Image (spheres, rainbow, N blue to C red):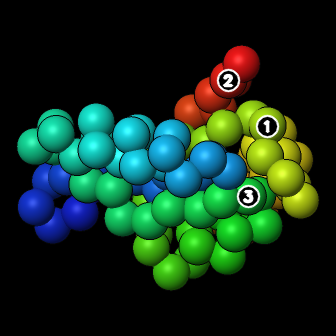
């Protein structure tokens, strides 16, 4: 699924501002990808999905408040599941 311009819409989630920025910058270098939102924890991911309508969520596993695995469960059990790339960081 893509937007009108054919770009893949991505929501990036990581508790580290540096990593969110780095991942977003790398993804935005691809002409076929557009980062449409960012979140710092799983709760914010769930809040952002209806607003930014991503095609895919790129999410860190280890985040405060709600980790990526629990956020993935909630997204996939909801009315509008999304593809998710779950990252593991050291």
Q: Is residue 48 above or below residue 86?
A: below
Disc marking residue 89: 2
Q: Is residue 35 above or below residue 62?
A: below
Residue hosting label 3: 41
Q: Secondary structure at mark 1?
A: loop
- Does 62 sit left or right of 31 as displayed? right
* Earlier sequence position, callout 2 versus callout 1: 1
Q: Secondary structure at mark 3?
A: loop
Task: For residue 82, say whether it is visible.
Answer: no
Residue 16 percent coordinates (x, y): 61, 47
Say whether marks 2 and 3 touch (CB < 8 Å): no
Taking depth in this image into account, of 44 and 81 the one nearest to the observer is 44
* Earlier sequence position, callout 3 versus callout 1: 3
Q: CA distance from mark 3 to mark 1?
A: 9 Å
Disc marking residue 22: none
- Does 24 sit left or right of 62 as displayed? left
Residue 22 percent coordinates (x, y): 39, 40
Q: Is residue 43 above or below residue 77?
A: below
Mark 2 packing: few (<14 Cα in 10 Å), some, or many (20+)?
few
Residue at horizontal 19 percent and vertical 52 percent from the top: 7
Taking depth in this image into account, of 29 and 78 the one nearest to the observer is 29
User: Which residue is outermost to the top?
Assistant: 90
Task: For residue 35, say whether it is visible.
Answer: yes
Disc marking residue 62: 1
Say whether marks 2 and 1 touch (CB < 8 Å): yes
Residue at horizontal 44 percent and vertical 65 percent from the top: 37
């Amino acid at each position: 699924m893509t937007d009108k311009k054919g770009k893949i819409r991505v929501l990036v989630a990581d508790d580290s501002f540096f990593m969110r920025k780095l991942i977003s910058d790398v993804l935005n270098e691809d002409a076929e990808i557009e980062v449409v939102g960012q979140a710092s924890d799983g709760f914010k991911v769930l809040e952002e999905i209806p607003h930014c309508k991503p095609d895919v969520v790129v999410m860190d596993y280890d985040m405060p408040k709600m980790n990526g695995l629990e956020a993935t469960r909630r997204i996939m059990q909801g009315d509008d599941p999304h593809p998710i790339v779950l990252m593991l960081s050291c």
